[in-house]
């Protein structure tokens, strides 16, 4: 028997034998080592991982005592990869929040807890790094209570000389040593934790559905441990109670009890929350249950490319049975959730495609276990899904379905990329498309005005990861450059100008003269052309030529090479030649007139302005406001957000000032700030910047 209660893999026979758990927490808390200890099957020292992974780690094991298949998902700890964290939350039915005793709870963890709370996902807190000099278990517990609510310790650490030597299990009144052996507490040890155990018992009674427990407890009755355990398990399963446990991932101390608790108290897929499912048209609602005999409904949680097996999809099965070699329907409609078209992820209902191999992630993350089929509730790897992308739905061909995707973070940090050599341009385009199909938090933009390829990301760490994949995975050498802002030009005062094109020396000549009046219009008015020519000064067949020449020149710009907008041009007079006038001559004359009318006194540059909503912890509102003032922002108001201690700041900010805002906001708000942005209008660029660009 393996010490942590795990054995070699055995496929579950029903969803009741499945537990899917996701580990979340900041980088450096020990999640990767905890994943290995939970699923490797052997309790012993493992090397502390750097936890710099940028993707989901998945491993499965079988709990020997119950035969339950436990699949554990390890998520990246950096904030830039919150998209993978949310994908992990979709894949699992319960969450283990890993908190380092020396570091406490960061803002990203707080936000994730609130997201889980909103949908009632069961969760517990695993406290690590208690052997460090700065670690204080009581302080961590107090912080957990402030942040998480009904969070109560199930275990207490025994630390001697900066070494975790034992863990007291409060409910059972036992001491577990470094070897995983449990013994009853001595009288002295029991007295030391008597108050903490009483607090635990009272918390169990308070969250119990058995109303008689409190009366029995207050009357002095000694409640039996098994009843308390049953009530505790029920409260954890229904997200009414959030236990705090002690673990040491490098040595595995506390891991066997954590695995037992996950199996006993976390919900099976039959008990878990399920996402909204419709048909691909978005109309018919499916009543999805974790029934292996029901129609198939599954979702692609992550897509990667393996050098040996090719495209590899991590799939969560919500209903039905997924069989190797079966033909399935693939649907994807991210735009319905986001509310707009998502570049790189167009809506689709693809032709059916055949499933390749089905595999279970192996114990400890090492290798895979091939399968003929997988049932509702399982999390498996699938090969050869050529068209299925991350967040797509797999369903029976005769009953197509669509699972509403998980909450998608908006990529707000842009970086412009280009191939270092022209020979790599085609390979770069293909590599970017593959990366976009794998990660729905990336957005690709081909800016026709600035001629840049812009990749929108969640932060600098994700940028580094993408560049690393391009260079090492796809062998494409890339360079980055600052993202250019798409400016506009506009006339700021009325101008009268003549455009004259006279070329009559030798051969067929060119002759066209136009007299124009140019007036500025309100922002967003566009271009207006007015014809006031009388007496045939400009023949009627050349009037459209004048307008075409004006439009072409406005699109190219009249002063600094940016499109010119919000202007009215009136053709008031002109001249033509019976032989040398032509369509092209009048087009060129009109364009020349606009260029001659444009100078620093008549034309100004316009910059795009975004409406920004910033949500930030109250403690950092002042810092955010000061930072906005340095970005030429117009702040329109603030208001509190519920009772969560957060404030929304509404402002309008020039796009140029938002280029690095995700990084800067994270700094000034200590990680508590998030924001959204949307284009509202073009506004005048300050004179100093205008002169610099025109010069």
Image: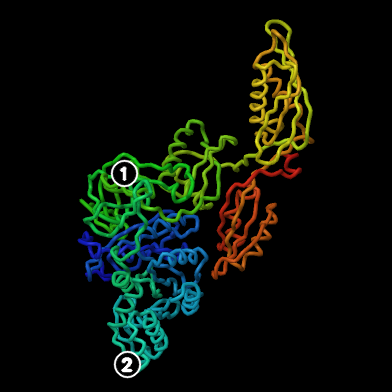
Q: Tag 1, which secondary structure?
A: loop
Report x, y in % for residue 598.
75, 31
In this figure, which residue is indicated by the disc labeled 2?
A: 221
* 143 relative position to 660: left or right: left
Picture residue at 21% right of the left edge, 56% below the top: 293
The quarter of the rendered structure image containing the C terminus is top right
* Residue at the spot 42% in from the left edge and 76% down from the top edge: 163
Please state which of residues 130 and 145 is positioned toward the viewer in this rendering.
145
The residues bearing labels 2 and 1 have C-alpha atoms spaced at a distance of 60 Å
Q: Is residue 244 above or below residue 316?
A: below
Circle 1 crowding by C-alpha within 10 Å: few under 14, some 14–19, many from 20: many
Question: What kind of colouring is applied to the model shown?
Answer: rainbow
Residue 385 bears which disc, if any?
1
Q: Position of residue 340 (x, y in %)?
A: 49, 46
Mark yes or no: residue 32 visible: yes
Q: Mark 2 or mark 1, which has the lower sequence index?
A: 2
In the rendered image, the residue lying farthest to the top is 507
Q: Is residue 44 above or below residue 85?
A: below
Instruction: Tell me if 19 is positioned left or right of 534 in this view.
Output: left
Q: Quadrant of residue 229?
A: bottom left
Quarter-of-image position of residue 288: bottom left
Q: Do tag 2 and tag 1 residues touch (Cβ < 8 Å)? A: no
Q: Nearer the viewer, residue 661 or 133?
A: 661
Q: Position of residue 429 (x, y in %)?
A: 46, 36
């Amino acid at each position: 028997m393996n010490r942590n209660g795990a054995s070699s893999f055995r496929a579950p026979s029903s969803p009741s034998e499945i537990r899917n758990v996701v580990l979340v927490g900041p980088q450096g808390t020990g999640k990767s080592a905890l994943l290995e200890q939970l699923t490797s099957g052997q309790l012993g020292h493992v090397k502390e991982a750097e936890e710099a992974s940028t993707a989901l780690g998945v491993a499965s094991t079988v709990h020997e005592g119950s035969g339950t298949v436990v699949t554990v998902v390890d998520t990246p700890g950096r904030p830039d990869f919150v998209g993978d964290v949310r994908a992990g939350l979709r894949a699992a039915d319960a969450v283990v929040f890993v908190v380092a005793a020396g570091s406490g709870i960061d803002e990203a963890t707080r936000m994730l807890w609130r997201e889980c709370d909103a949908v009632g996902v069961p969760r517990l807190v695993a406290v690590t790094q208690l052997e460090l000099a700065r670690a204080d278990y009581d302080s961590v517990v107090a912080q957990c209570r402030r942040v998480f609510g009904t969070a109560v310790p199930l275990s207490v650490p025994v630390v001697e000389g900066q070494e975790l030597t034992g863990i007291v299990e409060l409910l059972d009144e036992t001491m577990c040593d470094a070897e995983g052996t449990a013994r009853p507490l001595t009288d002295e040890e029991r007295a030391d934790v008597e108050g903490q155990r009483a607090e635990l018992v009272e918390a169990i009674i308070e969250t119990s559905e058995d109303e008689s427990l409190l009366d029995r407890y207050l009357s002095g009755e000694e409640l039996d441990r098994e009843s308390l355990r049953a009530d505790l398990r029920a409260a954890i399963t229904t997200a009414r109670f959030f236990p705090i446990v002690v673990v040491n991932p490098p040595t595995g101390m506390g891991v066997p009890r954590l695995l037992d608790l996950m199996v006993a108290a976390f919900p099976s897929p039959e008990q878990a929350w399920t996402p909204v499912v419709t048909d691909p048209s978005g109309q018919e609602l499916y009543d999805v249950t974790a029934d292996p005999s029901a129609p198939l409904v599954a979702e692609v949680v992550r897509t990667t490319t393996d050098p040996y097996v090719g495209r590899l999809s991590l799939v969560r099965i919500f209903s039905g049975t997924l069989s190797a070699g079966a033909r399935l329907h693939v649907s994807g409609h991210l735009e319905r959730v986001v509310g707009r078209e998502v570049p790189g992820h167009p809506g689709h209902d693809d032709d059916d495609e055949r499933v390749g191999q089905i595999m279970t992630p192996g114990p400890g993350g090492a290798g895979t276990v091939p399968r003929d089929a997988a049932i509702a509730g399982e999390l498996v790897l699938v090969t050869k899904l050529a068209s299925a992308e991350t967040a797509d739905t797999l369903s029976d061909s005769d009953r197509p379905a669509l699972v509403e995707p998980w909450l998608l973070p908006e990529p707000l940090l842009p970086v412009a990329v280009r191939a270092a050599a022209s020979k790599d341009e085609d390979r770069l385009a293909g590599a970017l498309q593959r990366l976009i199909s794998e990660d729905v938090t990336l957005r690709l933009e081909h800016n026709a005005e600035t001629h840049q390829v812009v990749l929108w990301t969640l932060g600098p760490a994700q940028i580094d990861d993408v560049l690393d994949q391009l260079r090492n995975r796809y062998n494409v050498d890339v360079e980055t450059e600052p993202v250019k802002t798409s400016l506009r030009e506009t006339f700021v005062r009325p101008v009268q100008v003549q455009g004259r094109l006279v070329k009559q020396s030798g051969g067929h000549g060119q002759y066209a003269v136009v007299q124009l009046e140019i007036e500025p219009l309100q922002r967003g008015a566009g271009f207006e052309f007015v014809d006031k020519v009388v007496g045939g000064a400009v023949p009627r067949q050349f009037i459209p030529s004048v307008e075409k020449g004006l439009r072409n020149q406005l699109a190219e710009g009249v002063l600094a090479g940016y499109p010119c907008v919000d202007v009215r041009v009136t053709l008031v007079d002109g001249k033509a030649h019976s032989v040398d006038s032509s369509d092209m001559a009048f087009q060129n004359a009109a364009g020349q007139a606009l260029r001659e009318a444009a100078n620093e006194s008549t034309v100004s540059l316009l910059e795009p302005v975004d409406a920004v909503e910033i949500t930030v912890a109250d403690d950092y509102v002042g810092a955010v406001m000061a930072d906005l003032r340095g970005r030429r922002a117009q702040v329109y108001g603030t208001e509190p957000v519920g009772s969560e201690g957060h404030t929304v700041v509404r402002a309008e900010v020039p796009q140029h000032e938002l280029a690095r805002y995700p990084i800067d906001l994270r700094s000034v708000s200590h990680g508590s700030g998030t924001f959204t942005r949307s284009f509202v209008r073009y506004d005048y660029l300050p004179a100093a910047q205008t002169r610099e660009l025109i010069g």
